[in-house]
Image (cartoon, grey):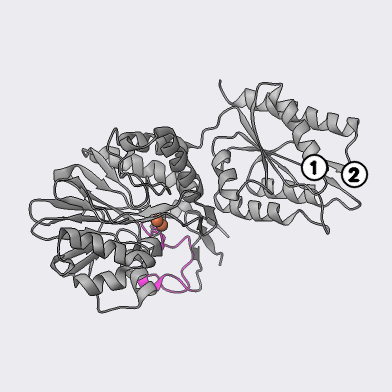
């Protein structure tokens, strides 16, 4: 993919499309991703962000279509994670920039990654402006969204926000703008991205949105470093972040389970029955089929998280341990929790699940249901009743 | 003296170490940190910290 796109007069997308990446440190990117970088032609030719290391030639090739890379004056590094900085040593070699703009944490992170103290770093602070000729860049630090070094770059003359990882989506496409693709698929990628990357920093997202609103800046395009650029109704993604970061829930329950010989699965379905007949929307996810990152995407608007695992060697099944390790790190809030499982002779798993739910401060429904071997009618009835009980609590706390 | 953890990024303030890069000497308790001290990793304010 080497097709430069002029996203605004004199502003070019010169990034790379990664059609084949499928695993992003444990987040499944089923349709690949893109690493966006932007080249602004002005008195000081300025490049924003770079691409993952193996794509440096794609990027340089794109730049060449617009200008000789040696003529680039400034490089802005909004974020140092290697998907955007891996190619920076080669890019700096090629463009020999006069200045490399980054936050104070960005400089530290660049040094800690590439160990080059000879690069022409120029630390910028939040709110600082620099002129590049006809245009002005304003930097806005967005610490922990999602790394300490993260920042936004805003070009007021273009009403363009270059938003680094925020507002991105992992989706490889030949199109560059949101209005050129299916909007519901786009939002599905955007919410998965939010749930898997930004969820733990939801409090900061709320603060940032408030701060940006107060700045009262005009935004008619948001250009993230992954996926499609928000050109048509760009503020829709800010509104969506506002909603997701509030972590409000629907009348929805998520049942996550793993099973050895289908006993725990029978219980999962019985709990689902109790919920569904009470009018609650249910997602049943089996960890043998559903990826942890898709489970998290379903969790974001679920009021109840119901976990099921049989006991294997005195503990829960390993896929469930994986799921819980991941879930805890993403720090969900305001959820109900419940645990269930089948066991042979010892039955520790349910207790462990309940403990994990408690650690995530979820409101628990009893100690959980632990049934020996294959559930009988009476055992399944308990599961249906648990589903009904959780349904009633969801209805009490979530308005229609 | 008690250690405090930043609830935003996970940085641990250890009074025995202080925060010398930002002028806080070793041996400074969390309570004695200036009110405008912020997490040296993510910039969160003192309110974002809880005892470890
Ligand atoms: Fe990142
Ligand atoms: Fe990224």
- The quadrant where residue B1 appears: bottom right
Could you tell me which quadrant the C terminus of chain A lies in? top right
Chain ID, mark 1: A
Q: Which residue is mark 1?
A: A264
Helix, strand or loop for disc 1: helix
- Is the C-beta separation of discs 1 and 2 under 8 Å? no
Magenta span includes B36: yes
Magenta span includes A300: no
Asked if residue A310 lies left or right of residue A60, the reply is right
Q: Position of residue A60 (x, y in %)?
A: 25, 65
Does residue A65 appear anywhere in the picture? yes
Q: Which residue is mark 2?
A: A372
In space, the residues marked 1 and 2 are separated at their CA atoms by: 10 Å
Q: Position of residue A160 (x, y in %)?
A: 22, 44
Marked residue nearer the N-terminal end (1 or 2): 1
Helix, strand or loop for disc 2: strand
Residue visible at 41% across and 46% down? A169
Asked if residue A214 lies left or right of residue A68, the reply is right
């Amino acid at each position: 993919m080497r097709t430069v796109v002029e996203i605004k007069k004199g502003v070019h997308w010169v990034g790379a499309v990664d059609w084949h990446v499928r695993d992003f440190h444990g987040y499944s990117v089923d349709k690949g991703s893109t690493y966006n970088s932007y080249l602004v032609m002005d008195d000081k030719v300025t490049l924003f962000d770079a691409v993952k290391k193996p794509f440096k030639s794609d990027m340089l090739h794109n730049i060449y279509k617009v200008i000789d890379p040696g003529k680039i004056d400034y490089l802005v590094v909004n974020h140092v994670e290697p998907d955007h900085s891996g190619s920076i040593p080669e890019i700096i070699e090629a463009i020999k920039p006069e200045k490399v703009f980054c936050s104070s944490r960005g400089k530290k992170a660049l040094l800690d990654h590439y160990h080059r103290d000879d690069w022409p770093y120029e630390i910028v602070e939040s709110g600082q402006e620099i002129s590049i000729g006809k245009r002005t860049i304003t930097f806005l630090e967005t610490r922990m969204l999602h790394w300490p070094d993260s920042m936004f770059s805003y070009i007021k003359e273009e009403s363009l926000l270059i938003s680094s990882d925020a507002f991105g989506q992992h989706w490889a496409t030949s199109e560059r703008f949101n209005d050129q693709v299916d909007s519901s698929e786009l939002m599905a990628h955007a919410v998965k991205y939010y749930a898997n990357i930004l969820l733990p920093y939801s409090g900061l997202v709320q603060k940032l949105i408030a701060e940006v609103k107060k700045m009262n800046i005009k935004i008619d395009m948001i250009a993230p470093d992954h996926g499609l650029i928000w050109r048509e109704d760009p503020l829709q993604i800010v509104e969506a972040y506002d909603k997701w970061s509030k972590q409000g829930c629907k009348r929805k329950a998520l049942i996550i389970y793993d099973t050895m010989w289908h006993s725990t699965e029978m219980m999962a379905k019985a709990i689902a029955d109790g919920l569904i007949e009470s009018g609650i929307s249910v997602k049943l996810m089996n960890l043998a089929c559903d990826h942890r990152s898709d489970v998290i995407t379903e969790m974001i608007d679920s009021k109840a998280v119901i976990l099921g695992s049989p006991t294997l060697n005195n503990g829960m099944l390993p896929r469930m341990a994986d799921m819980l390790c991941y879930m805890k790190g993403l720090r969900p809030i305001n959820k109900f929790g419940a645990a269930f499982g089948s066991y042979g002779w010892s039955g520790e798993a349910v207790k462990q699940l309940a403990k994990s739910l408690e650690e995530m401060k979820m409101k628990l429904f009893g100690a959980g249901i632990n049934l020996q071997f294959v559930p009988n009618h009476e055992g399944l009835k308990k599961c249906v009743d648990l589903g009904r009980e959780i349904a009633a609590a969801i209805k009490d706390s979530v308005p229609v | 003296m008690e250690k405090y953890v930043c609830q935003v990024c996970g940085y641990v303030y250890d009074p025995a170490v202080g925060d010398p890069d930002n002028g806080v000497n070793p041996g400074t308790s969390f309570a004695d940190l200036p009110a405008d001290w912020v997490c040296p990793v993510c910039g969160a304010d003192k309110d974002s910290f809880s005892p470890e």
